Amino acid sequence: MTDYTQELIDAGIPPIMHQMLSRHGVGALVVRMGIKFLELSPERMVGTMPVEGNTQVAGILHGGAHLVLAETLGSFAAGIHAGVDGQALGIEIGASHHRSVATGLVTGTCTAIHLGRTLTTHEVVMTDEAGRKLSTARITNLIRRSGSAE
């Protein structure tokens, strides 16, 4: 079994959550994209991602990178809401892009819209270092409980 302790520390995951994530870490894509977690709760999740290394051919942050950050934050928030007997599964995501960014760090702020027994919905706003809104995404996750049918 792989030990993901250092990966969890590097991503900013607090020790209290290490046991919950010890089997899978934060995921290879999260590591590759350079996403770091700053706040973690079902109601509010904040994380950052560098523009460098996540750009498209025109030298600006790739639109898909916005969605990776949004889905990461929304899914982690839904996973915390689901608890140890549940699993969050993303079922829908969409985004509107408002402006581009070519350098620096992007911050995603994920806010709960609905935290239900079987569904969660979060809004994720990505901003640049000057606080300008880059994109807005909405993600819905299905909460599956241990022992429930697919």
Image (cartoon, grey):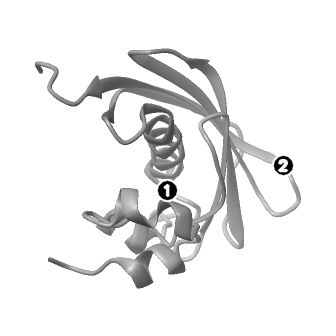
Q: Residues within 10 Å of mark 2 (few under 14, many from 20)?
A: some
Q: Nearer the viewer, residue 98 or 45?
A: 45
Whether residue 82 is situated above or below residue 119 in the rendered picture: below
Whether residue 122 is situated above or below residue 50 in the rendered picture: above
Spot occupied by residue 64 in the image (x, y as percentages of width and height): 44, 49
Residue 65 seen by the camera: yes
Spot occupied by residue 61 in the image (x, y as percentages of width and height): 56, 60
Q: Residues within 10 Å of mark 1 (few under 14, many from 20)?
A: some
SS of the residue under disc 1: loop
Q: For the residue marked with disc 1, what is the amino acid? A: His
Tell which residue pokes out farthest to the right in this image.
130
Query: Which residue does the image show at 49% across and 41% down from the upper left?
Result: 80
Spot occupied by residue 69 in the image (x, y as percentages of width and height): 52, 52
SS of the residue under disc 2: loop
**Is 132 left, or right, of 117 in this rendering?**
right
**Is 118 left, or right, of 106 in this rendering?**
left
| Quadrant occupied by the N terminus | bottom left
How many callouts does the rendering have? 2
Circle 1 residue? 62
Compute the Cα span from label 1 to label 2: 17 Å
Spot occupied by residue 122 in the image (x, y as percentages of width and height): 58, 28
Whether residue 17 is situated above or below residue 71 in the rendered picture: below
**Is 127 left, or right, of 27 in this rendering?**
right
Residue 13 seen by the camera: no
Query: Which residue does the image show at 12% across and 21% down from the upper left?
Result: 150
